[in-house]
Image (spheres, rainbow, N blue to C red):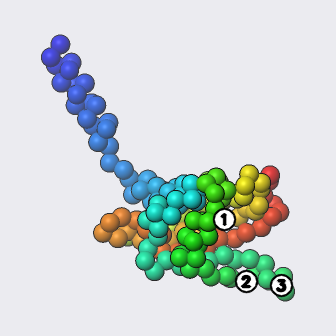
Amino acid sequence: MKQFFIVLTVLAFSISSKAQTAEDSVKAVVTNLFTAMIKSDTSLLKSCFADSMVLQTIARGKSGGAEVKTETAATFVKSISSLKPGSADEQITFGTVLIDGPLALVWTPYKFYFNGQFSHCGVNSFHLVRFKDGWRIQYLIDTRRRTGCEN
């Protein structure tokens, strides 16, 4: 009986102490970003970003061609802080996750809903850097469209 409890204790300890993989920790940062958005939690949102984070969107310009728009992380955080919790709901699926040492790339197709209404869809491309305190989003660029979203 004593051996059974020893085996059970060792098994429980090994299951609970399972190390998070690099991919899991990268995905956690991306997931935290969208959790922060839907909760309008600026503290959690800021914790996802590197100090020199770059945020860009590829949109259709007035001439019909691609146009890249840049927004500061501070402006993005401010816009999220002004929303009621539940307003900004970006639903992602994880596509590709690539990691090489301190660099990670994450590709996430998404659908964005604002106040419960479908707004647009596209793809996010994240570049994360692993700093001493963990992974942070260094660069985020996305596409936005209203068609071809399979709503």
Give the residue pinned by disc 3. Answer: 62
Q: Which amino acid type corresponds to the residue marked 3 in the rendered image?
A: Lys
Residue beneath the point at 66% across and 76% down: 57
98 left or right of 123 in image: left
Callout 2: 10 Å neighbours few (<14), some, many (20+)?
Answer: few
Measure the C-alpha gap from mark 3 to mark 2: 9 Å
Callout 1–callout 3 Cβ contact below 8 Å:
no
Which residue occupies the foreground of this view, 21 or 91? 91
> On residue 123, which mark appears?
1
Q: Which amino acid type corresponds to the residue marked 1 in the rendered image?
A: Val
Q: Which amino acid type corresponds to the residue marked 2 in the rendered image?
A: Glu
Q: In this rendering, which labeled residue sits more in front, label 1 or label 3? A: 3
What residue occupies the far bottom of the structure in this picture?
Answer: 63
- Tell me the quarter of the picture where residue 113 sits: bottom right
Helix or strand or loop: what does disc 2 sit on?
strand
Quarter holding the N terminus is top left
